Amino acid sequence: MMNWEQLLSVKRLGKPTSGKITPESRTEFQRDYDRLIFSSPFRRLQNKTQVFPLPGSVFVHNRLTHSLEVASVGRSLGNMVSAGLQKQGIDHLLMGEVGAVVAAACLAHDMGNPPFGHSGEDAIKEFFKSGKGRSLRTEVSEAQWKDLTLFDGNANTFRLLSHQFNGRRAGGFALTYTMLASIVKYPYEAVHATKPKFGFFQSEKNTYAEIATEMGLVQKGSEGIQFARHPLVYLVEAADDICYQIMDVEDAHKLGILTYTQTKALYLAFFDAEKDSASIQNIEKTLDEVSDPNEQIAYLRASVIGRLVHECVSAFIENYTQIMQGNFEDSLIKNISPVAAAAMKNVEHVSIKKVYAHQSVIEIELAGYKIISTLLDHFIAAVLHENHYNQKLLKLFPAQFIVNNEDTYENIQSVIDYISGMTDIYALELYRKITGISLPGVD
């Protein structure tokens, strides 16, 4: 059984201190949040695709706005769970900081994702599975090859936050163990993944094992590094689940992909006509008072998020014992009421059929595939093979990513580090330059 005495640790990665709790106006977990929000990788999220292409006349979500919204929902989830647990007599000196931990983890959850949305992840995987990267199979171990062919933004986030890049301090961002543990949704290696998701690369597996041991996480399996989730991971995951498709529906309405009637029906379906009659009356009353259709949809979306937050908090409290034992294998969003679950399933169905299949989404995905595959091809060749062209190309390679050895896996990772940190716009510009499509100073 895991315990909060270990789970809420202010010890920082890369710091030799004991992580003692000291009374300050700004707690260690709030420092995590501030450290992330002022960082360059976080700012770059403003030019990374969430689902739809970066905005023209209609402003839709990018990775930055999505992360900020997830952090807001995560803070609410954390605060409500900590209050609920304290009412049941489950307390700890730092229990009131759970909201701050979850908010920080939510803020960071997408920082390792490459440009061009989920197609960026897919492009990296496919480069090694079926693209030119296949030729590197014999150059790395089986476990390392799994890291590449199953590349996952979650694992890359953990690397970004914990790895010591050239010229940087030990421990990466030097975040608290608790916050780092709270972002790892899949606490096992790629070689032990039962689905194409995992939590850390081979290069960071010992770092995660150190953190998990310090946290007192339940060890799972008899081979390799496999642990149960840190309990707060469920809240981070729930915040992302709540925001992701619910917000995409609102964006689809703004872009004219879904009509007002369709969007309103999708949102109202989260409320039971009998049990929630009072809430529905209040919603309809507000909709009558507001004449702007976009504001009406925004109000409905906020109402749905509020409903899902309360349901996920209840799911956490109800499954608390299983969660603390490391035996809860589900997500909180899959344990909400039947009415809300049916509505969520319908949102997912409509999103897949109409939103994610929209021409603008497909176009950005295709462009992302081509751009990322080309960048991987050029830069991996440059770090592995010395010739005149590659020497020139490496002059564009940032010093923080340069690997001063001949380890193939580490050199490949350095290229992925560089490319995954790019914004959509920078990746496109670099692609044009190295392929000769555009020249500096020439329009």
Image: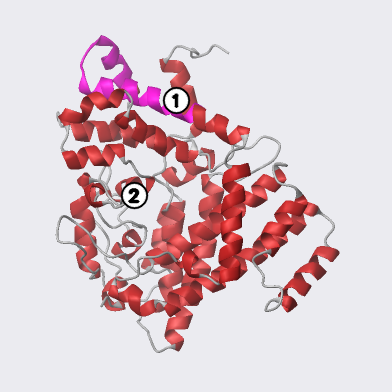
Range of residues picked out in magenta: 367-395
Name the residue tied to disc 2: 197
Picture coordinates of residue 217, whole percent (x, y)? 25, 68
Name the residue tied to disc 1: 371
Picture coordinates of residue 303, whole percent (x, y)? 66, 66
Q: Residue 334 magenta-drawn?
A: no
Which element type, helix, strand or loop, lies under badge 1? helix
Majority secondary structure of the magenta segment? helix
Residue 22 visible to an observer of this rendering: no
Left or right of residue 270, residue 46 in this image: left
According to the image, what is the colour scheme of the structure? secondary structure
Q: Of residues 399 and 349, which is closer to you in this image?
A: 349
User: In the image, what residue occupies the spot 45% across and 46% down?
Assistant: 42
Left or right of residue 176, residue 363 in this image: right
Q: Is residue 135 above or below residue 339?
A: above
Q: Of residues 309 and 111, which is closer to you in this image?
A: 309
Identity, as a three-letter code, of the amino acid under mark 1? Ile
User: In the image, what residue occupies the spot 67% across and 64% down?
Assistant: 269
Dot 1: few (<14), some (14–19), or many (≥20) neighbours within 10 Å? many
Quadrant assignment for the C terminus: top right
Q: Which mark is residue 109?
A: none
Dot 2: few (<14), some (14–19), or many (≥20) neighbours within 10 Å? many
Identity, as a three-letter code, of the amino acid under mark 2? Lys
User: In the image, what residue occupies the spot 50% across and 39% down?
Assistant: 48
Q: Verify CB contact (< 8 Å) between mark 1 and mark 2.
A: no
Q: CA distance from mark 1 to mark 2?
A: 24 Å
Q: Is residue 342 above or below residue 83?
A: above
